[in-house]
Image (spheres, grey):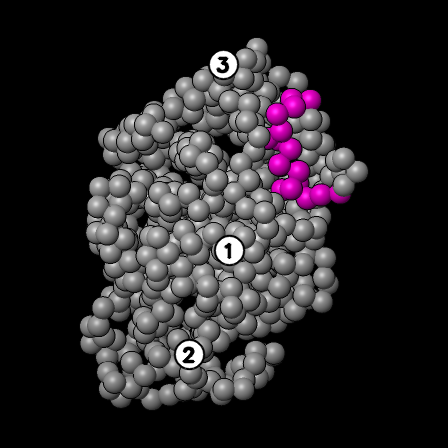
Amino acid sequence: MTNRHFVKPDFAVTTWELLKPYFDDLLNRELSSPTELEQWLKDSSELGAVVSEDMAWRYIKMTCDTANTVLRDRYNDFVQNIEPMMAPPTNDLNKKLMASPFANQLTKAGYAIYLRGIKNSIELFREENIPLTTQLQEMEQRYGEISGAQSIEHGGEKMTLQKAGIFLKNLNREIRKDVYVKIQTRRAIDEQALNDLFTKLIALRHQVALNAGFKNFRDFKHQSLARFDYTVQDCLNFHEAVKLHAVPLVNAHDEVRKRKLKLEEYRPWDTSVDEEGLPPLKPFANAEELIENTVACFNRLDPFFGECITTMKKMGRLDLDSRLGKAPGGYQYPLYETNVPFIFMNSVGLHRDLVTMVHEGGHAIHSFLDFDLELVDFKSPPSEVAELASMSMELMSMEHWEVFFKTEEELKRAKRQQLESVMDTLPWIAAIDKFQHWLYLNPTHSVEERYAEWRKIISDFGSSVINYKGLEDHLNRRWQVQLHLYEVPFYYIEYGFAQLGAIAVWRNYKTNPKLAIEKYKKALALGYTVSIPKIYEAAGIKFDFSPAYIKELMDFVKTEYNKI
């Protein structure tokens, strides 16, 4: 735990009134030298770490138990009564920093990037957006509440939709179909509510953009996500490159699966079952075993990686099992004061849970590696870098998954599934991102128009082999499973850019493991003290999403897949 110097050791964030004096101190403090400015920044960062960690725990506890109204109220109290009050003084602190004559004397690594971000925040700040942002945060959590309450009954057991997903791998096609239909029937119950929620979110986000002087939320969000190293046009080019070089691989693979499964019609309930007629991979029996095997796997990559997960276990920073009332999905939450992050996920014992664990484990290791950086903002890299950490870990750890699997054949199946996922991921990412561009460029669209556009996009990026005849309504609402659309708009294409980077890191690892790990650690330890391209360069790869580079990397994945 970081020792406090500015904030009192026993201070806890409870009300804005008790927090305000710290902001007043920073706002009123005289800064008469570069040294005093640097100390002011450290104190401001310390306050940010204290507040951030308090907010983090409120969110973590709420997502671990969405039915608990006390936990939900504590989170809402922060969103409604503390965070909005912090916004104006935070903007004033940013202005004070930029107005300081000593700001241009901040020459240590990281300050140029940091000041660029502060300038961007000032440009985007609008007082009238504070209540709208609060309203958005309250509405966005509704998605987790709705999804967390979804369950079905199968075989006499009530279960989450995540757990029900196990049966989509069942070798009995009728069982797969039955569970698939139950899942879709349950999703249909909330379809209207999720559409209504989404329509309101889009309208509110559009107003935020207008208030900030933008024509649409797409352009506002591009700037607010501080995408300094690529343009909106680069995103559009990425969509087209993926359609050209990744979608054909998905279609070709689905044709092979259809043939091996000896099916006349390849239906949605056939997409997860093993094509060789083998039972689902079950790399661990429970959360304890998942942790133990992850530590063993990470130790083979680098003992430091294993130590990170062990520390998290000791400190109670892992909640891995799926259960009713728990929010869907998985995440790693950095905790900037104690400097030991938290991993949340919904494991049910399947291969995908192993992947989620090593993915979030990669994020966690990133948090440990940038622990020593001076300011909290230095420890907050953009998503293009954060996801590089996690997605690279998926692929590098794959080289040591023998700790999870008992036989060579199981290990090969796991590796094939991972590379199939890599091939499938890019088209889905491109589809979700392209969908968002349309949604926010056409903010007054109807639900019918929304579905029509989604069908058009998914026909370009989805598998042409899967037959949805008679299930068109399932395809219409398929986008509703994507949490990011509701909770973190436009945070998704980063996964695509990072996936390309991760393939390149893995390619380096296969050539020279020791050097690849050394560069990986060096890159992550930079936090956000240099630009994204420079971080990628430190990792020994390129920040590139051109058609030629995508083709090169997808060809590499295909070659490696064929070797297994």
Q: For the point 58% across and 44% down, which residue is it?
A: 349
x and y percentages locating residue 454 in the rendered image: 53, 30
* Prevailing secondary structure class for the magenta stretch in the rendered image: helix
Residue under numbered circle 1: 291
First in sequence: mark 1 vs mark 3: 3
Give the structural element (helix, strand or loop) at label 1: helix
Between 200 and 187, the one lying in front of the other is 187
Q: Is residue 376 magenta?
A: no
Amino acid at pointer 1: Ile
Give the structural element (helix, strand or loop) at label 3: helix
How far separated are the C-alphas under marks 1 and 3? 37 Å
x and y percentages locating residue 525 in the rendered image: 29, 62
How far separated are the C-alphas under marks 2 and 3? 58 Å
| Start-end of magenta stretch | 158-174
Between 120 and 186, the one lying in front of the other is 186
How far separated are the C-alphas under marks 2 and 1? 26 Å
